Amino acid sequence: MNNIEIMGVLNITDNSFHDGGRYNSFKESFQHAKEIIREGADIIDIGAESSKPGSESVSSKVQIKKIEPVVEAIREISDIPISIDTRSSDVIKKLTKYRINIVNDISALQDMELINVIKDNNLMVSLMHMQGVPKNMQDNPAYDDVVTDVYDYLEKKVQLCVNSGINKSDIIIDPGFGFGKTLDHNYLLLNSLKKFTKLGCRILSGISRKSMIGSVINKPPSERLYGSLAATVLAIRNKANILRVHDVRQTRVLLNFKDLMIEKT
């Protein structure tokens, strides 16, 4: 699991924290998808439901309307692995015909029907930890021990998948930076990420341009590139395998130095 992959983010939303509204039309979103591919992403992650703190849920119908034409157009030009950022089994069912590859579920299978859809279509799944839901997740998050609590939660979710017939090699785990965590919680998790390798799954790090970066460098999302790259170095050193990022080209340059970041064991 030493291979590190870049997952480029395509938000087809009007309210995502960094690029909301920028790629909300088909023309803009497809153009950005081509840019993500051209800059060297290994995976493209496409979503139409913002999960920033305080955001409302988006219906499956609206998500499909926004995502489907972009996924169809991508498949006409590229075989890049496609991840769909959704909590809805209805969305995934509609998109399987386009040879999608990963379900990126921030709710870690609250929609239990997703288990059957994933298994029946040989998809991979990314299971994320979140305390609460996006609308309320940052309302005073608290833990007994954030690292242990998140680990135990993900361990149960991984076991649920395995017991349901999903291969462990098809499971990705994500501690959910910024999803029901304080600044201290986020950095405790980042510095303890290596502990999650015991679960035997690839680890996704989604820290790009988030408030955990902005709070340290006191910059808005548009000025958090260098802080994001610095935090990404920490994620790599702590065994992250998949880097979910807004800045593919710059992260690709950073990975030229990955052998210097990873401790030799």
Image (cartoon, rainbow, N blue to C red):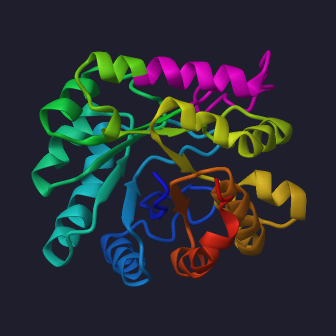
From the top left corner, tell me how far across and down residue 259 is, in percent: 61, 71
For this orientation, the residue located farthest to the front is: 265
What segment is highlighted magenta in the picture?
A: 129-158
> Residue 127 is drawn in which quadrant?
top left
Question: As drawn, is 128 to the left or to the right of 18?
Answer: left
**Residue drawn 38% across and 57% down?**
46
Is 148 magenta? The answer is yes
For this orientation, the residue located farthest to the left is: 97
In front here: 21 or 34? 34
From the top left corner, tell me how far across and down residue 156 is, in percent: 48, 17
Q: Relative to 223, does residue 144 appear above or below in the rendering?
A: above
**Residue drawn 36% across and 77% down?**
37
Is 172 magenta? The answer is no
Question: As drawn, is 209 to the left or to the right of 62?
Answer: right
In front here: 64 or 225? 225
**Residue drawn 59% across and 30% down?**
130
Q: Relative to 264, does residue 30 appear above or below in the rendering?
A: below
From the top left corner, tell me how far across and down residue 217 is, in percent: 88, 64
> Residue 67 is drawn in which quadrant?
bottom left
Question: As drawn, is 205 to the left or to the right of 119?
Answer: right
> Residue 76 is drawn in which quadrant?
bottom left
In front here: 120 or 31? 120
